Amino acid sequence: MHHRISGHLFIISGPSGAGKGTLRKLLFERIPDLMFSISCTTRSPREGELDGVDYHFIDEASFRHMIAGGKFLEWAKVHDNYYGTLREDVERELRDRKNVILEIDVQGAHQVKSNCPGAIMIFVAPPSISELEKRLRQRGTEEETVLQVRLKNAIEEMDDSSFFDHLIVNDEVARAAKEMENIIHSYK
């Protein structure tokens, strides 16, 4: 009988507005024993966000100190805030044979892959760029200039999808969630 030495690390990535967060939440309803790695950030909590649940909220000085100490599997500065995934958290869960999910941007996904070559990379894509634009506009949270930057980034990130192990087109949420669930199960 073959025993896994450790769990699998799954990276869910893709452009902003592709629906990564929605699919991840559905995935956790369907596969309860997955672990979600909570990111650290220097941004302030949004309405309803809790420290240690949505993010670990820390100040910039602490974050920079942690970067210098090699504490992150990946980190990035997005707009004016830092975001990062704690190496220790992920490695501890994997040693306990837990399957760990990271939901991060494409840049971060590459950093994790170089640190953890065995990570399984799942790219979540919108059905089209025009659909992505529609979703971002419906959110209504972005000013036009920010929205244009996000779209430009999305187009570049779409080119990157060939580096990923799996590509899920999020055309219909229930179908895409099922596809993601099947991918996770295929590694058990």
Image: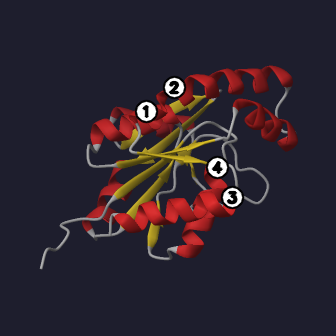
Q: Horizontally, is 148 left or right of 3 in the view?
A: right
Decide which of tag 3 and tag 1 comes sooner along the chain: 1
Decide which of tag 4 and tag 1 comes sooner along the chain: 1
Contact, CB < 8 Å: mark 4 with mark 3? yes
Q: CA distance from mark 4 to mark 2?
A: 16 Å
Q: CA distance from mark 2 to mark 3?
A: 22 Å
**Residue type of the residue flagged with mark 3:** Val
In front: 40, or 19? Answer: 19
Contact, CB < 8 Å: mark 1 with mark 2? yes
Write down the residue under mark 2: 159
**Residue type of the residue flagged with mark 2:** Asp
**Residue type of the residue flagged with mark 4:** Asn
Decide which of tag 2 and tag 3 comes sooner along the chain: 2
Label 3, residues with CA under 10 Å away: few <14, some 14-19, many ≥20: some
Label 2, residues with CA under 10 Å away: few <14, some 14-19, many ≥20: few
What x and y, as percent, mark residue 73? 36, 42
Write down the residue under mark 3: 173
Please tell me the numbered disc located at residue 170: 4
Q: Quadrant of residue 66?
A: top left
Write down the residue under mark 1: 162
Q: Quadrant of residue 126?
A: top right
